[in-house]
Amino acid sequence: MGARMMPSRHDPIRPRGEQPIGISIDGEPVAGVEGQTIAGVVLATGRLAWRKTSVDGRPRGLFCGIGVCFDCIVTVNGERDVRACQRRATDGDVVETQHDELPEAAR
Amino acid sequence: MSPASAASAATPASAARTVYAATPASAARTVLVIGAGPAGLAAAKAARERGASVTLLDAADATGGQYWRHLPASRPSANERALHHGWSTYTALHDELDRDPGCEVVLGAQVWAIEQADAAGQPAPVAVHVLVGPPDGTARRGRTFRPDALVLATGAHDRTLPFPGWDLPGVFTAGAAQAFAKGERVALGERVVIAGAGPFLLPVAASVAATGAKVLGVYEASRVSALVKGWLPKPWQLVGAAKKGGELAGYVGTHLRHRIPYVTGRAVVAAHGTDRVEAVTVAEVDADWSPIAGTERRIEVDAVCVSHGFTPRLELPIAAGCELTPDRFVRVDDGQGTSVPGVYAAGEITGIGGVDAALAEGEIAGHVAAGGSPRDADLAAAVGARRTFTGFAARIEAAHGIRQGWTSWLEDDTVVCRCEEVPYGRLRETREATCASGLRSMKLTTRAGLGICQGRICGRTVEQLIGATGEAGEASAPATSVTTDRRPIASPLRIGELAGRDPNTITHRASEKGHP
C-alpha cells in the first residue's frame, strides 16, 4: 500500500519513453526517471515520510506538493532546506533527510 | 535578447544607473508579467500584441501554472491532452510566446522582493528582485527588473483546514494529488479519500483515478441546500459559461465510469495512524459544518487529499502596495489596474474564478499594461468573457465557502501551525490567559505562523480561530492592518543570498527575516 508511479504500459496517455536515473537517500539507492522531482522519486518507492519535526520528532513528507508548505525539505548534494517537491532529481543526486533539533535554550 | 532583458540582466546597482540612460525614449514599453499560469500567459500574449517588450517570470521550470501542470519534456507521450482541459489553448499560448523574440520567458525565477517606487527612487512603478536558478539552490543568479508596467498573476494555493491527524504522512492537499498525477504520473496512494469543499475536488478525483488509484469517495462539506443557493440563482448568467458546464459534465462522466461516490454534507474530521495515515473518520456535518454526533464512519485509506478552497498568493501584490478588497483579493478596475499606477493584477488573486476568468482578465491586463484601453474593440471578447466568468467566484463562495462550525472538530492536541507544531489547545489557552486577541501578539507568544512556510498554510486559520473564539481583534480589521498575508520577504531565501546583494537595493525591512 502506498504511493507509486503509474506503470507506463497501463498509462492511457501512452508514454513514449523515459530515461532512468538513480539517486540515493540517506545512502540507499533509489531509481526514478528523468524529470521527476526528488519527492516524486522517493514517493514512488512507497516511502511517505522523510523529515523529522524539530519539536516532537514527528515524521513528515509531502503535503502541499506545490512548494508552499516547506514540509518536504531535504538536503541535496550538501545544500540544505531544498523543497523536494520543487527540485528535479538529477542522476547521482545525494539526498539526506533532515531533523533539525531545537537549540538547547528553546527546549 | 530583448532590450528589457539586456538592461535587467545587469546587477541591481548598475541597472539602476543604466536602464533609463540606455533605453531611448522611443523604445517599446516594457511589461513584466509574474506567473506563467493561464492569466500570466494570456497577459504576456496580449501585451506582445500591443507591441510591448515582455518578460514573463515563473518560479517553476515550466509554464502552465498549477492548472496546466504537465510532464517534463524528457517524458513525451502520445496523448497527454487527455489529462487536461483546454490543452490546445495552453500549447498555442506557450508555442507563440516561445518562438517570439520580443518575449523573454525566465523560468526558475523566484521573486523575493518588490520595492515600491518611493523606496526604489526610480521612475518605474516598482523594482522587482528575482533569484534565477534551481529551486532553493545556493548559486542562483540575482536579477532586478524595473518595467514600465507590471502584471501580477501569482495565482492561489490550497487552503486546508486542520483536523486531528492532518499532520500524518499520507495526508495531502488536493493540489498535491493533482500536481503529482499530472506532473509525474504518481498516485499518492492506492485507496484514496478526497474531501473538503469546492468544485476543484472533482478534477482532482478524476486525475487521481486516472493514475490507477481507487478513489473511495469525494466528500463535499457543503450541503445540497448551500450548493443550490450558490449555483442555481440567476441561471441565465451561466448560459455564456456553457464550456464550464461541459467541463463539469466530463468530471461527472469520469466519476460514473470509475464508480466514485460524490457525497455532500460530509467532512473528514480525523485521520488515524501512528507514523502514517491508516484510516479517516468521515462525519455528516450541518449547514455550519459542525459534525453531527453519531454519524461518524471509519474508512481504511492509505492517502487522503483535503482542500477547503484556495488562498490567493498576495505577498507580491501587498509588497507592491496594492490595495485589497474587504474579502482580501487584489482590488482592480475595469482595466485590471490595481491601486498602484502601472501595476495590474489578473487571475485568482482578484477572486477565485477559475481558468476562464483568469484567461480573460490576463488578456485585459496585458493589453492595458502595454498601453491599451479596456474599451478597445479587440478586447470586446475578453471583456465579455470576464463578465460571464467572474460571476463564478461569488457562486463558488456562496456554495462552498468555509463555515464557522469546522472548529468543533479540533481537539486540544490538534496541530494548527504545522511548521512550529503549535496545537490548538495552546492557542486557546494563550488567548484566554492573556486576552491576546491581536494577531501579532498571538504569533509572538505561541509562534503560530512564524515557521518556514511564513504562515501560508495556517495564517488564515489562526486569524479565524482568534476571531471565532476571542473578542474582535485585528483579524476582522481592514486589509490594511496586520494580517498573515504580509511578508517583508516574499519567499524564504538564504542569508548568504541576501549578503551577496548590493546593499543599496535592499530595504531596511529586508534584514528582519531571512531563511530560518
Image (cartoon, rainbow, N blue to C red):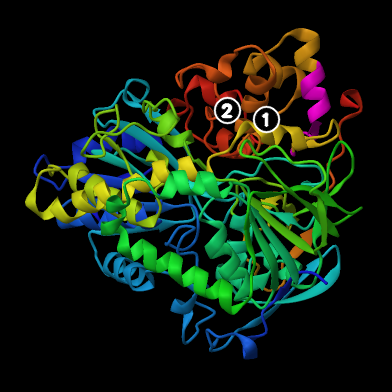
In this orientation, which residue lies closer to the viewer: B228 or B335?
B228
Q: Quadrant of the N terminus of chain B?
A: bottom left
Pointers 1 and 2 in contact (CB under 8 A)? yes
Q: Quadrant of residue B188?
A: bottom right
Q: Quadrant of residue B248?
A: bottom left
Q: Identify the residue position indicated by label 1 in the image.
A: B449
Tell which circle, 1 or 2, labels the residue nearer the N-terminal end.
1
State the image coordinates of residue B239 (x, y, percent, origin top left): 27, 58
Q: Which mark is residue B124?
A: none
In this orientation, which residue lies closer to the viewer: A15 or B58?
A15
Residue lying at 87% horizontally and 36% vertically, measured from the top left: A55
In this orientation, which residue lies closer to the viewer: B83 or B342?
B83
Q: CA distance from mark 1 to mark 2?
A: 8 Å
Q: Which mark is residue B484?
A: 2
Residue lying at 54% horizontally and 62% vertically, measured from the top left: B202
Under circle 1, the secondary element is loop
User: Is B268 rendered above or below residue A91?
Assistant: above
Q: Badge 2: how crowded within 10 Å, few (<14), some, or many (20+)?
A: many
State the image coordinates of residue B306 (x, y, percent, origin top left): 66, 52
Q: Is residue B450 left or right of residue B506?
A: right
In this orientation, which residue lies closer to the viewer: B247 or B172?
B247
What is the magenta range? Answer: B418-429
Under circle 2, the secondary element is loop
Mark 1 belongs to which subunit?
Answer: B
Task: Using the rendered image of the protein, determine whether residue B343 is visible from the camera's viewpoint.
Answer: yes
Q: Badge 1: how crowded within 10 Å, few (<14), some, or many (20+)?
A: many
State the image coordinates of residue A50 (x, y, percent, origin top left): 81, 56
The amino acid marked with disc number 1 is: Gly
